[in-house]
Amino acid sequence: MTNIHPTAIVDPKAQLAPDVTVGPYCVVGADVKLDEGVVLHSHVVVEGRTSVGARTQIYPFASIGHAPQDLKFRGEPSRLEIGTDNLIREHVTMNPGTEGGGMLTRVGNHCAFLTASHVGHDSIVGNHVVFSNNVMLAGHCKIDDYVIFGGGAALHQFGRVGKHAFIGGMSAVENDVIPYGLAVGNRAHLMGLNLVGLKRRGFTREQIGAMRGAYTALFADEGTLRERVEKVAARFADQPDVMEIVNFIRSESDRAICMPRSERTA
């Protein structure tokens, strides 16, 4: 049965699965849905049109689903969707979407949001993503699967980070980071591929070798970036991991591509 501490305030209209735990001094709003096995440890506030997936744990003083930090927000019925098996630590903030951004903020499954990290309005976060302490994700961002942010990193609004990328601690990221990339610095620049992460996740020597060859070709001095992308696409057409990078660069975006510091941008 649902375990609700006597000091918690749970709106009778909220939808709670039978085995949800709501700890001391938590507040759960009327439009909230908590799936099976969700745990609110204590002093957690979940408000707005927010759904929290199964077995997600939320720690003290997290603020989930309150109005987005957007001065254009006028109370539109936007949503925040949080997937399954997530870890949301102390003082984390997550905001719902806005009319100007699709009305939805979405977080995937098996993610970890460490102390005081922030997910801005209208952002889409994939699966197995890690936000270290104090990571700041602005509005309208898109984070693909298996991305890791080091402590204190920040991503500009409308920014994108491709799958398996690593963002170094304290980095200020203004531009899109390619899949498998390693970006560091203020302002952030590419330092190469996230080789440690790729090896940990079981990518083969052949896969990594192809990505390294593609990276070298993409960020060479000759020609424009567009020309280099087309050459890499033709050369590595049978390599899905390389084509992930190619398609990421080809995709429309509000931001430029994060480049190596030693190379000119095209």
Image: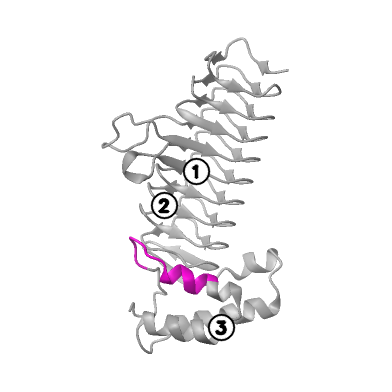
Mark sitting earlier along the chain (1/2): 1
Q: Nearer the viewer, residue 246 or 186?
A: 246
Disc 3 secondary structure class: loop
Amino acid marked by disc 1: Arg
Amino acid marked by disc 3: Phe
Which of pointers 1 and 2 indicates the residue nearer the eye? 1
Residue at 30% across, 34% down: 73
Q: Nearer the viewer, residue 172 or 106?
A: 106
Q: How many marks?
A: 3
Residue 206 located left or right of residue 81: right
Q: How far, Cα to Cα, is label 2 from label 3?
A: 28 Å
Q: Which mark is residue 106?
A: 1
Q: Is residue 111 magenta?
A: no
Q: Colour scheme used in the picture? A: one colour
Question: Where residue 82 sits in the image (x, y, percent)?
Answer: 55, 38
Dots 1 and 3: beta carbons under 8 Å? no
Q: How far, Cα to Cα, is label 1 from label 3?
A: 33 Å
Question: Where residue 87 sits in the image (x, y, percent)?
Answer: 62, 39
Disc 2 secondary structure class: loop
Q: Is residue 252 magenta?
A: yes
Q: On the image, numbered disc 2 is attached to which residue?
A: 141
Mark sitting earlier along the chain (1/3): 1
* In the depicted structure, whether residue 266 falls above or below residue 59: below
Mark sitting earlier along the chain (2/3): 2
* Quadrant of the drawing holding the C terminus: bottom left
Amino acid marked by disc 2: Cys
Magenta highlight range: 244-256
Question: Where residue 116 sits in the image (x, y, percent)?
Answer: 49, 39
Q: Which mark is residue 236?
A: 3
